[in-house]
Structures are given as C-alpha cells and as structure tokens.
Image: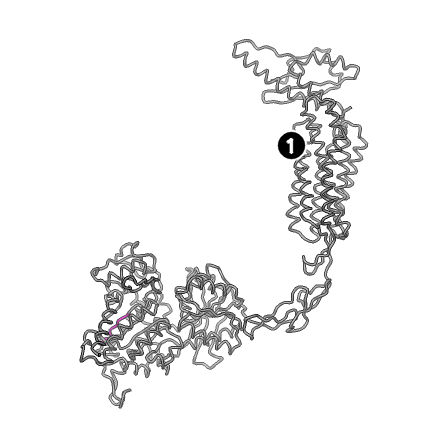
Amino acid sequence: MTLYSCCFILLLFTWNTAAYGPNQRAQKKGDIILGGLFPIHFGVAAKDQDLKSRPESVECIRYNFRGFRWLQAMIFAIEEINSSPTLLPNMTLGYRIFDTCNTVSKALEATLSFVAQNKIDSLNLDEFCNCSEHIPSTIAVVGATGSGISTAVANLLGLFYIPQVSYASSSRLLSNKNQFKSFLRTIPNDEHQATAMADIIEYFRWNWVGTIAADDDYGRPGIEKFREEAEERDICIDFSELISQYSDEEEIQQVVEVIQNSTARVIVVFSSGPDLEPLIKEIVRRNITGKIWLASEAWASSSLIAMPEFFRVIGSTIGFALKAGQIPGFREFLQKVHPKKSTNNGFAKEFWEETFNCYLPDGSKNSPASTSFHKGHEEGLGAGNGTAAFRPPCTGDENITSVETPYMDYTHLRISYNVYLAVYSIAHALQDIYTCTPGKGLFTNGSCADIKKVEAWQVLKHLRHLNFTNNMGEQVDFDEFGDLVGNYSIINWHLSPEDGSVVFEEVGHYNVYAKKGERLFINENKILWSGFSKEVPFSNCSRDCLPGTRKGIIEGEPTCCFECVDCPDGEYSDETDASACDKCPEDYWSNENHTSCIPKQIEFLSWTEPFGIALTLFAVLGIFLTSFVLGVFTKFRNTPIVKATNRELSYLLLFSLLCCFSSSLFFIGEPQNWTCRLRQPAFGISFVLCISCILVKTNRVLLVFEAKIPTSLHRKWWGLNLQFLLVFLCTFVQIVICVIWLYTAPPSSYRNHELEDEIIFITCHEGSLMALGFLIGYTCLLAAICFFFAFKSRKLPENFNEAKFITFSMLIFFIVWISFIPAYASTYGKFVSAVEVIAILAASFGLLACIFFNKVYIILFKPSRNTIEEVRCSTAAHAFKVAARATLRRSNVSRKRSNSLGGSTGSTPSSSISSKSNHEDPFPLPASAERQRQQQRGCKQKVSFGSGTVTLSLSFEEPQKNAMANRNAKRRNSLEAQNSDDSLMRHRALLPLQ
C-alpha cells in the first residue's frame, strides 16, 4: 500500500511540475529551500470547461507590478542573507517562488509542489522510493497575500507542519492555532485594524455608516469585528454588503444602488484592491460623490484604486497603512532587473514585456511548458498596455527608470518590508538552529536540530520562539497566535499638484501598545475632505431633536438610530424631542423654525400698491387718449381723412379700444366672483371687436382697389350694413365662446394656500384653461388674417395706405401675446393678473398709436393735407401707375422693334403721362395753357421706375368747368391711359369722398 502511495505522490508531483514550467517560476538552488507565493497577476481568465477534452489550466491575466516588487523583495533578502558573514555562514538559501494569480486554485497548485517531498518524508517511504535527491524539501513558505488564499494554503501546509509566514494576510481567523497550526505573519491582526476604524469614527463623532466587505476570509471576519466594536460605541450601520472581483454585473449594480440611496456618508470597506475595483468603477461611472471611504490596509494604497480618474469619487479616503520600513540597497536592486541577467527569475521576462509594451523572443520554443505559457500570454495574460501579438520586439537596452510603474514606487515600503521581514524571520530561526547548543535546545531533553537535515516542523518550533532585532532596531517576536503586534499609519488621499497623481499623506497613527483612549492620534489640519475641504463631513445617525422637529423612526434600521424630522409646512412643535408635530389653523402658517404659528400674509394685485397704481394710471391714460381721438374724429367727421378711413367703422374701432383699456381695470383689486367672471370675457370680446373692425376696413379697401368697375350690386353689398354685419359675426363667435365658458366652467375667486407657505394668494380660478386658450387663440387668428390683408395692401395710395400701420400694430399685437403665453405660464399669484394687464395695455396702445395717431396729427397739424384734392390725387396716382408701367413697356418694345428694322424713332402720343429720361418736359405747353394750369387746383405725382420717371398731372376744377376739363383731358391723354381712367372711375364710385 505504501508503494502505491509513493507512486501516487510522485505522479502528482510530476504533473504539478509540468504545469509550472521554467518561465512560470523563480527558483534558485541552495542548501535550504524557501517557498514563495506572490500575486504576479490580479486574476485568471474566465473559461468554461465543458469537459469535451482534457481540462487545461486556467490562464492568469492583468499583470501586477507591485506583486513582482514583493517577489523581488524576497529574492533581495535571500541574496543579502547569503552574502552575510554572520547570518547562516557557510549555508546557502535557495528559493522556489510561484504566482498565485490572486486565486486559491493557483495557490494550491504551487503549494502541492511544496508539500510533495514533505509528504514522502512524513510517510517514511525512503526505503521504497529514494526521491530525496531529486526533489529538494521546502522548509518554509513566504506568503500568501490575500487572507482567503492564505487560509487555503495554511490548511494544506498545516497538515505537514510546514511553516507559512504571510506578509499581507491579516484576517483574524488565521490566529486560530487549532486550525492553522503552522501559520505566522509579519502583519498585524485585523482585530486591531477594526478597532482602529471604530476609534476613528468615534473620534469624528460619526454614528451612521455603511460597511462593505470582500466575500472571503479577509473581509467577512474583519467587518464582523468592526460590527462588534461599533455596537460598543453606539455606531449604527445603515447597510452591509459583500463584494468580490468575480461578482457579476447585476450584483455590483445592486450594491451601487444601495450606496447611492444610503444617507450614510461614511463607508467602511474591508477588501482587497482587486475585489473592490469593479465596485469603484461602477461608482465612478455613476459619479456618486460625497462619500467618505474608510479603507483597510489591503486597499488603502492599492494601485488599482488610487488612480487619478477615480479621485473625484474616492478623494475623501482615510485608510490604514502598515508602518513603512527601510531596505537599504533595495532601490538599486530593483533597477538591476533584466531578463538576461535575472536567469533565476522566470517572471522577469514577462515583467520586461509589460513594462515596455514589447515582446522578447522566446529562446526555448521547444519547451512545451514555455510554449503553453506564451500561448496564454499572447491571448491576453498581460494586463499591461497591449498583447504580445501587437507589440514591437524588445531591444533589451530599455531603461527601467524611464517608465513610471508601481514596481518602482519604493517611497513607502510597507508590504515589501513585510516580505523582507518574513524572510529574515525564517533566516533567524535557522540561525537559532545553527547556533543551538545541545542541552539548551527546544526539543526533547534540550536537543537541537541538525541544520544540514533540518525539517520543516523544527523550523516552525523555532519560529514560535523567535526573538530578534530587525534592521530598524525594532524587536521582532511572534505572539502565541503567530502574530506580530504592530502599529498603523493613518493616510489621507491627496491629489498631487505636480503630476496629478494620487499621493498618500500621513495624517496620524494608531499605537496598539498604548492604553485605550490614547491609541489614536490624528492631525486634522492635514486632512482634505473630498480633496479640497477642511470641514469635517457630517455622518450621524441621529441628533437631539430641537423644537421645530420631531423624532422619526427609520424602518428597518437599528433601534439605536432615529432621525430628527422637520415638522411639515403648516405644522409646529414647541418642545424638545417631540413625538409629533401639531397642525396650524387654516389661515396660519408655521414660522421659519416651525416652533409656532403666525398669520398668513394675504396678497393680490391691489389698487394701493405701486405696481397696481402704475397699471391703473396707464389704463386711464389709454382711456383718455382714446376718448381724445374719438372727439377729434367726431369734430372733424366731415373732412376727407375721416371719411376716407371709413368714419362709422373708425367710431366702432375707437369704442372697442375704450373697452380694451377699461377691461384691464377688472384685473386690479381683490378678486371677487363677479370680477373673475367678467374680466376675461370683457377682454376677449373687446379685442375681437377691435380686430374685426380693422379686418373689415383693410379687406374693404383692398377689394375696392382690386375690383373691376363697380356696379350697383357691389355698392349694395359693400355698404355699411354688410360691414357691420361682418364685425358682428366675428364678434359673435367670441361671445359664444365666452358664454359656453361661463356656463360650463365659470371662473371664480379662491384663496390659494399652495403657491407659497406663508402667503394666501387671492386669485381667480379660470375654470378652464382650454377655454382661455380658445379665447386668446381666436383673437390671434383674426389678428393673423388682418395682418395678411394689411400686408397685401401695402402698395395702396398713401392716404389709404393704413396697411403698413396696421401691419405694425399686428406685429406689436403678436409680440405681446406670444410673450404673454410663457410669462403667464411661469408666473403665479398676483403676477398672473399683472402680466395679463400689461399685455392688454401694450396691445391696446399699439393699436391706438399705429392706426390713429398719424391721422390725428394730419387733422390737427397738417390741415392742408386733409383735402379732397390730396386724397383724389393720391388715389389717381395709384390708378395711373399700372397704366404708366404698361405705356413704358410698350414704348420700349416699339423702340427696340424700330431699331431692329433700321427705321426712325416715332413719337408716342402725347399725354399727361410722359416718360422722361431727363427732368425737362418733352411736351411743353403754350404760355396761355400754362397760366390756365396754374389757376387750376391740382397736383403732380412722379412715379419712378427702372428706366425713367413718370409724371402724373391731375387738375380739379369747379363743377361748371368739368365739361371743358374733360375735353382737354381727352385731348391730352393717349389711348394707353384708358385702363387708368377705368380704375379712377371705380375708385370714385366706392370711396366716400363727397
């Protein structure tokens, strides 16, 4: 049976050795071999093993420069010991170092190679299979990093009592010597760290925090100890979540949602960098800021987390760091690494490729293990700057100091120094064996172990009784649990102003040797919260509830935690720690502090306030100006200007403007039910009446000048009756809208308590915003039609050319009411009425000024232009423009035709419409005719075209001379002016000038 066991162990060892080829280990022969476990990579690639073929070993990914530096620290310490004349003289230490890839499976693969020979020795199988000369024994192992990995390794090494000295595993579970018999460490127990975290939270008077822990043997025990310490200090925990670097995206999203929705600003995290990285990336993506992160030593200085692009989220981190040590000569040793020189270090090649983003030719391509390694590497093992397939070849002359990587960050040697110290601890245990005096040894009857045939369990015995002074003058001895009691440095993350990198500023320390209450020291002046603030953030679960607040129970939270809830608006409390708030009476409101009730302020657009007075004065001014214009038109009602502007419609238009100005007054003063129901219909009907009058006037004049010679039917249908009928119909539609509105949803006055807490706004509830929209929309529709006809009439005679003024008035109207809509929607309270009053007044003044002020000015100050001759002259000028254009076109065509035929230029028939290239009259009149023309009342109009100027001469004589004038006009006018005569006749037929 023992023979079969020996063969099985040999086969197992042979398989494990094949899996770890030369390029996947760092090894050196020696008299005594030390094992090493380091995370050269951060993880392994996910690979689905369907078992359709022989399973392959998973590949490691994402290169860890710090892990390689820790490995170098072990090699440096061994070489330093081998060169020491006092420590283990005449003895040589060798090493076998493997990559754990930060996973348990890879660590156990490496551990199998450590225990293979020890298993054979423990079974005393030498008589059956002498394997000792082929497989050197590993008498101690330095590692591993993570507590979860060390737990698995310690379980295996403990079976054979192979001492394991960890440099970074701080889980308090590993202090259980019944389970982990051979485990020791050069890092303090997490129990001290959890206590220190609780002390920091108590120091800043926080009592409302969240916790996050890695789902392994490091995070779970650490956060459990913190919970115990927090409960003793009445610190409440809002949430507690577990994470892992292998958590799927949905789990990470859930944790982030909890963090985002939590009111706790302080988050205590027990995790390693790789486990925390996915969570931090998601938090950065969501830009969740304002949190204070309390970091355990495993990630407080992690290069995966301490990145400038993460700083806006984790810039307030306060973390624990191991006390930094000094390793003389280590800096120079790190700079000497080179693939060709570091022949014993199989990881140097990959390090070089990852550092300089290049690839080194493989010198042992025939090696299956080497080929397997490079195949995996080219598929993405290195998490550096690229894969080997896309890298240029390395020259071998690259300068390691020219590249900034975590490998060269030797300013604060914490884990590296722990590795250094772990190697020296084993060396001093061997030195104790080497110098042991028989009779004073630690074994039976005071015997000593033979250094040349030393076994692992003997080294473990001496490690438990180790006591030496390190290079920094500090005493090193493991306690009964295999732990070193050490102190912590407290660091705060800052952003370097020089290069923008994250730097770790030491802001205090924690002395575990001091008595309780004196262990923690913090220099608050050095701490920057969120990277820039000096003010300590607030993260308390509850505080004393002052008057104006009440105590509120937070459902699902610890009983030690309650919140102070401000009394709702309208409620108050006048005692401390009130259980409930009392409501204020309806017309009262709570004061600013919610400690009592005060009467609400009542507001509306009052007649007595300055704003209301100003609006009233403008409304009265509009009424006065409109009345003045109406008086002027009444007094001069028989003048041509008043007649030409359709006198009766002008009276109605002025009356509507009076109504418009008057309707604005209904919006001022305390709203009553009757004013609320009257003001909108009054405003809407007044404006529609006004716009209807303008529309009918504009449309009538346009039809007059575009119609043919009018008949009696035209005169009948375009009389005053039809005009007033159209105005009535347009206004009637608005009246129907208002009646339906008032019947279905009548406006009413109401006291609005909702707009502002301390104010009661007395306003009008419009009943239906849709009805108000129809009212204003119909008015704007009529205004748009009016604007269209006014724009179309822009070329009418000057005296009839109200079009441009109507156009301006409609533009003002549209600007006012288009601006009114957003202003009305964005204001509240009394300002709603004020906005509508301003809109009514602005639109009314625009209509009054544009349509009537010019006419009033002519009537009062330019009476010479208020004559029949002026009006007719302007009318005739328009009528002859068309004929003049036609005459010029025909003249040009005839001239061009004559020139093309070579004939002489013929003269055109003489007429009062003459084409002039110069200012001289080509057809001068006799002197007697000239005197007669001067004695007549008339006018002369000049119309400019592109090719010349047309002069129109019109005379108006007494009625008894009309016959002679007509005969003279017929002699002067040519056949080309016939169309103009027709146009003039139809204008005289329709315009009320007589």
**Mark 1 closeness class: few <14, some 14–19, many ≥20 residues within 10 Å:** some
Query: Can residue 407 be seen at all in this image of the molecule?
Result: no
Residue 648, image quadrant: top right
Residue nearest the observer in this picture, 148 or 431: 148
Image position, residue 431 (x, y; %): 27, 81
Quarter in which the N terminus is drawn: bottom left
As for residue 364 lying within the magenta part, the answer is no
**Residue at mark 1:** 791
* Magenta span dominant secondary structure: strand
Image position, residue 546 (x, y; %): 64, 71
Q: Residue furthest top?
A: 903
* Residue found 49% across the figure and 80% down from its top: 517
Residue nearest the observer in this picture, 550 or 523: 550
Q: Is residue 738 above or below residue 202?
A: above
253 left or right of 876 in image: left
Residue nearest the observer in this picture, 514 or 146: 146
Numbered disc 1: secondary structure: helix
Q: Residue furthest right?
A: 635
- Indicate the amino acid at tag 1: Phe
Image position, residue 679 (x, y; %): 75, 47
Image position, residue 460 (x, y; %): 30, 81
Quarter in which the C terminus is drawn: top right
Magenta extent: 92-97
Query: Can residue 45 be seen at all in this image of the molecule?
Result: yes
939 left or right of 229 in image: right
